[in-house]
């Protein structure tokens, strides 16, 4: 007789069903796992053997074969331990053979029979609920799985013995409750930033429309300080966005104690990050920084210090909102709709364009430094802003009266306007102006006569590409939303063009 247990294999954030088939037959004692297992799955037999012995059971002296179907799908990870162990327990009569029907099972076994946490429980629970299954998962992941549905049956045992007792009626396990992560740290506030009113305005515009932003300025001007305060003015994640973010974090194994977070991700990788670390990849095609920043912020400090190949690899996710990792034997797609905030010095010495300063290397200091950034990459950044050095007179001024709370209220109002506009047009998949495509942008951001004339003249003078033209319209639409205006006027386009024109100023100054 063959005992079957349902589990999953992960392809990105999707959980594909896998059938664990356990066969115990007469013959020389052996324990074989087939079905394209990786090293962690092949080693499961030793963990399962030790865990069963620690739980008071012994493997029969017979030939045991475990098949993971479909056999041509690669199986990776340690979450196959528990379904294999439960299949064996049902096969030898330790638990009822029908007890596992209607359940999807994931979990790693310790040698003493305890069930350890694994990555990917949330997408496994969502996939199980879609198939009408319940879920058996480790106790440490029960709160995470409970977010999938309030109606699905979830068992989150701490050990094999506890689960066996529940299935044989000797004890009853309760359903775990979903849990949110407590916010123990207060977010940084814009009140801490003295001066830099123009930069604060650009940060507000970027937050309101989800626009990519590049700060260019000398060291110590406050570029990183401003970027780190962006999360304090962004709206909290909606329930759907929270699940999207948490599914990626679950696959990456970065959810602690099964508690989800409603804050938008803020990822700030070091400039030595490799391409696999940035866009995802590796032996198991794990999500990279661009996916871990989904629905949040990716902050790249010292932008030209990143490898040019790494920066150019961001062009596709910036445009499409997803990243495709292709390997010889499989393809994985991760969502990566993030807001890019970058900061850089105007040159290697950091003082190009400063009054009274002449670089020993001349103009090539700035030219060579900025040449590390490709034109197509910079073309995908909506707002380019020069951030001047802060003077001593700015630092002795009292703290500004307006902080993150007041700015966040205006950002939330502008975002609500955008959500309602795109929902009325039947485009609920578009939430911010930055996500609007060309045809949709023509509907919502048509400038008035004065604005159209200004945009036409500026596009010729600045030699804007088609992408640059549309990004100016997106920023202008956001500026109109912040003003509560129905249409895009000349002054909105003038400010949007000023943010775009700043891309050429550092080189001119050098």
Image (tube, rainbow, N blue to C red):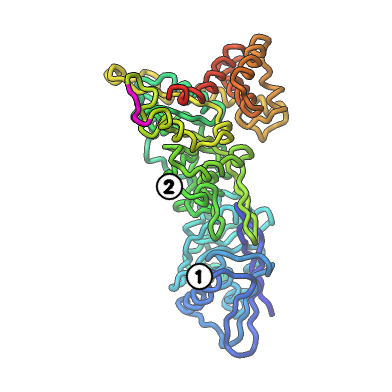
Question: What residue appears at the point 54 percent right and 82 percent down from the top-left corner?
Answer: 59
Q: Quadrant of the N terminus?
A: bottom right
Q: Is residue 371 above or below residue 76?
A: above
Q: Is residue 238 above or below residue 419?
A: below
Percent across and percent down for residue 321 are: 61, 40
Residue 396 position by quadrant: top left
Instruction: Note whether residue 128 is visible.
Output: no
- Between residue 249 and residue 494, name the one nearer to us: 494
What residue range appears in magenta?
A: 357-361
Is residue 360 magenta-colored?
yes
Question: What residue appears at the point 62 percent right and 61 percent down from the top-left corner?
Answer: 8
Q: Is residue 453 above or below residue 501?
A: above
Is residue 312 magenta-colored?
no
Which residue is the site of mark 2? 272
Which residue is the site of mark 1? 160
Q: Is residue 222 left or right of residue 478?
A: left
Percent across and percent down for residue 121 are: 55, 56
Verify CB contact (< 8 Å) between mark 2 and mark 1.
Answer: no
Mark 2 to mark 1 CA distance (whole Å) = 44 Å
Percent across and percent down for residue 353 are: 39, 23
How packed mark 2 is, by other alpha carbons closer than 10 Å (few <14, some 14-19, many 20 or more), is: few
For mark 2, give the secondary structure: loop
For mark 1, give the secondary structure: helix
Q: Is residue 335 above or below residue 11?
A: above
Question: What residue appears at the point 56 percent right and 49 percent down from the top-left corner?
Answer: 247
Instruction: Note whether residue 253 is visible.
Output: yes
């Amino acid at each position: 007789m063959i005992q079957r247990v349902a589990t999953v294999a992960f392809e990105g954030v999707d959980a594909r069903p896998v059938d664990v088939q356990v066969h115990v037959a007469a013959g020389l004692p052996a324990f074989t796992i087939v079905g394209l297992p990786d090293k962690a799955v092949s080693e499961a037999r030793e963990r399962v053997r030790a865990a069963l012995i620690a739980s008071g059971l012994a493997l029969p002296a017979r030939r045991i074969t475990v098949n993971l179907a479909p056999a041509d799908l690669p199986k990776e990870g340690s979450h196959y331990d528990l379904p294999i162990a439960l299949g064996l327990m049902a096969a030898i009569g330790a638990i009822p053979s029908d007890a596992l029907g209607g359940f999807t099972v994931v979990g790693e076994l310790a040698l003493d029979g305890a069930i350890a946490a694994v990555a990917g429980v949330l997408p496994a629970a969502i996939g199980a609920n879609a198939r009408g299954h319940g879920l058996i998962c480790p106790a440490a992941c029960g709160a995470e799985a409970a977010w999938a549905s309030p109606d699905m049956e979830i068992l989150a045992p701490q050990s094999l013995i506890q689960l066996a007792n529940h299935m044989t009626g000797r004890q009853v396990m309760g359903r775990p409750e979903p849990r949110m992560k407590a916010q123990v740290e207060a977010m940084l506030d814009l009140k801490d930033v003295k001066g830099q009113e123009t930069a604060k305005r650009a940060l507000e515009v970027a937050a309101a429309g989800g626009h990519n932003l590049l700060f260019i300025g000398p060291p110590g001007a406050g570029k990183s300080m401003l970027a780190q305060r962006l999360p304090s003015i962004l709206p909290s994640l909606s329930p759907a966005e929270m699940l999207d973010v948490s599914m990626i974090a679950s696959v990456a194994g970065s959810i602690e104690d099964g508690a989800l977070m409603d804050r938008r991700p803020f990822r700030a990788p070091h400039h030595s990050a490799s391409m696999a670390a940035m866009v995802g990849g590796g032996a198991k095609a794990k999500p990279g920084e661009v996916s871990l920043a989904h629905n949040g912020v990716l902050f790249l400090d010292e932008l030209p210090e990143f490898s040019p190949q790494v920066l150019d690899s961001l062009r596709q996710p910036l445009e499409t909102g997803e990243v495709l990792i292709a390997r010889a034997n499989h393809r994985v797609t991760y969502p990566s709709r993030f807001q890019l905030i970058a900061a850089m010095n105007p040159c290697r010495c950091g003082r190009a364009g400063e009054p009274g300063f002449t670089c020993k290397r001349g103009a090539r200091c700035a030219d060579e430094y900025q040449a590390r950034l490709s034109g197509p990459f910079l073309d995908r950044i909506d707002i380019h802003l020069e951030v001047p050095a802060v003077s001593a007179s700015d630092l002795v001024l009292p703290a500004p009266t307006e902080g993150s709370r007041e700015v966040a209220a205006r950002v939330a109002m502008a975002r609500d306007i955008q959500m309602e506009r795109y929902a009325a047009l039947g485009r609920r998949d578009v939430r911010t102006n930055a996500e609007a495509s060309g045809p949709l942008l023509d509907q919502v951001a048509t400038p008035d006569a004065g604005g159209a004339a200004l945009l036409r003249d500026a596009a010729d003078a600045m030699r804007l590409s088609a992408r640059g033209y549309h990004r100016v319209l997106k920023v202008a639409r956001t500026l109109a939303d912040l003003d509560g205006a129905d249409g895009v006027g000349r002054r909105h386009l003038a400010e949007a063009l000023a943010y775009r024109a700043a891309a050429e100023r550092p080189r001119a100054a050098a």
